[in-house]
Image (cartoon, grey):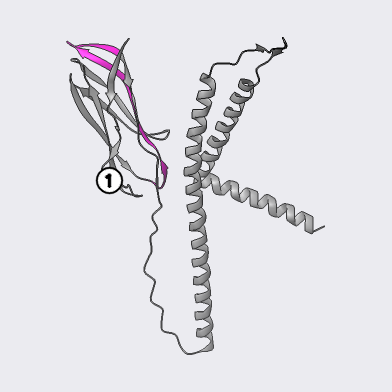
């Protein structure tokens, strides 16, 4: 299998039809495959949002050419990291295919967040009120109910905004933790040394560093997954609140 250096995605190979994607809109994701060799380069580009597949597109780039590959994407709210990968690349020459290894097979966008759209409906006009005590009480109750519901909605939106920002932060720390783990695995292992007194000193740094990097990567991956999935986050939160309230009830009911 031949390795073709400089073949594959061009630099900064992910861009969008809209600079700032919004929830519910359909944007086009673009990438470009470069083939500096005389034979035709064929394969498949797979588009991902983090680990979720968006679409697959076949391509065939003529010799010494560039081909733009694109797909449409309906934008959901949340944190996104769009990437593309080249699968099964082959060179086609005189009707014969030969499988190759392409060096630049991955393209990655910058991570970005899409806020959830809030639809505000027009407030219904109030009905004429009779000047009676009953009407006045009904109006007062309606005002209190509207005020309470508005306050609860605002607090719920604030909590969800905090969850979304925290998810984005944890996702970035997850990437850093995985990079640290990779460096720890690739670092040369420490060897035992003999000090000036002739005593053998056993290495301890590598023995501790790699497990700590594993634990850090696992923690941020787990926390990022919980905060990125709204249903899972609120389900766990409700379970914790239930356990706390039950513990308090048992304590003070004795």
22 shown above or below 213: below
Q: Splitting the image into 4 quarters, where does residue 41 fall?
A: top left
Badge 1: residue crowd in 10 Å (few <14, some 14–19, many ≥20): few
- Looking at the figure, which quarter contains the C terminus? bottom right
At mark 1, the secondary structure is: loop
Q: Residue at x 65, y 12 (%)?
A: 192
Q: Residue at x 28, y 43 (%)?
A: 27
Left or right: 202 in relation to 66: right
The residue closer to the viewer here, 20 or 123, is 20
Tell me where residue 25 appears, x and y as whole percent: 31, 48
Tell me where residue 82 appears, x and y as whole percent: 36, 36
Tell me where residue 51 appears, x and y as whole percent: 43, 33
Left or right: 131 in relation to 248: left
Left or right: 39 in relation to 146: left
Q: Residue furthest front?
A: 196
The residue closer to the viewer here, 206 or 201, is 201
Magenta range: 76-99
- The total of numbered circles placed on residues is 1
- Looking at the figure, which quarter contains the N terminus? top left
240 shown above or below 42: below
Tell me where residue 185 appears, x and y as whole percent: 53, 21
Q: Residue furthest right?
A: 254
211 shown above or below 137: above
Q: Residue at x 30, y 35 (%)?
A: 14
> Does 63 appear in magenta?
no
- Chief secondary structure of the magenta portion: strand
Q: Residue at x 66, y 20 (%)?
A: 204
The residue where tag 1 is placed is 18
> Does 77 appear in magenta?
yes
């Amino acid at each position: 299998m031949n390795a073709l250096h400089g073949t594959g995605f061009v630099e900064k190979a992910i861009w969008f039809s809209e600079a700032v994607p919004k929830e519910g809109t359909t944007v086009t994701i673009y990438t470009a495959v470069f083939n500096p060799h005389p034979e035709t380069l064929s394969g498949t580009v797979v588009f991902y949002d983090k680990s979720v597949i968006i679409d697959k597109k076949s391509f065939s780039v003529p010799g010494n050419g560039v081909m733009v590959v694109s797909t449409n994407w309906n934008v959901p709210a949340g944190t996104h990291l769009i990437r593309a990968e080249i699968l099964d690349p082959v060179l086609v020459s005189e009707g014969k295919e030969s499988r190759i290894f392409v060096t630049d097979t991955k393209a990655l966008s910058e991570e970005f967040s899409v806020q959830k759209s809030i639809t505000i409906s027009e407030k219904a006009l109030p009905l004429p009120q009779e000047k009676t005590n009953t009407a006045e009480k009904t109006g007062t109750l309606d005002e209190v109910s509207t005020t309470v519901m508005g306050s609860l909605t605002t607090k719920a939106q604030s909590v969800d905004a905090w969850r979304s920002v925290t998810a984005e932060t944890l996702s970035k720390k997850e990437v850093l933790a995985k990079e640290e783990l990779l460096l720890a695995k690739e670092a040369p292992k420490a060897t035992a040394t003999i000090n000036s007194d002739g005593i053998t000193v056993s290495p301890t740094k590598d023995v501790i560093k790699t497990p700590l990097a594993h634990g850090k990567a696992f923690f941020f991956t787990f926390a990022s997954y919980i905060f990125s999935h709204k249903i899972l986050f609120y389900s766990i939160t409700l379970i914790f609140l239930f356990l706390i309230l039950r513990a308090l009830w048992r304590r003070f009911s004795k």
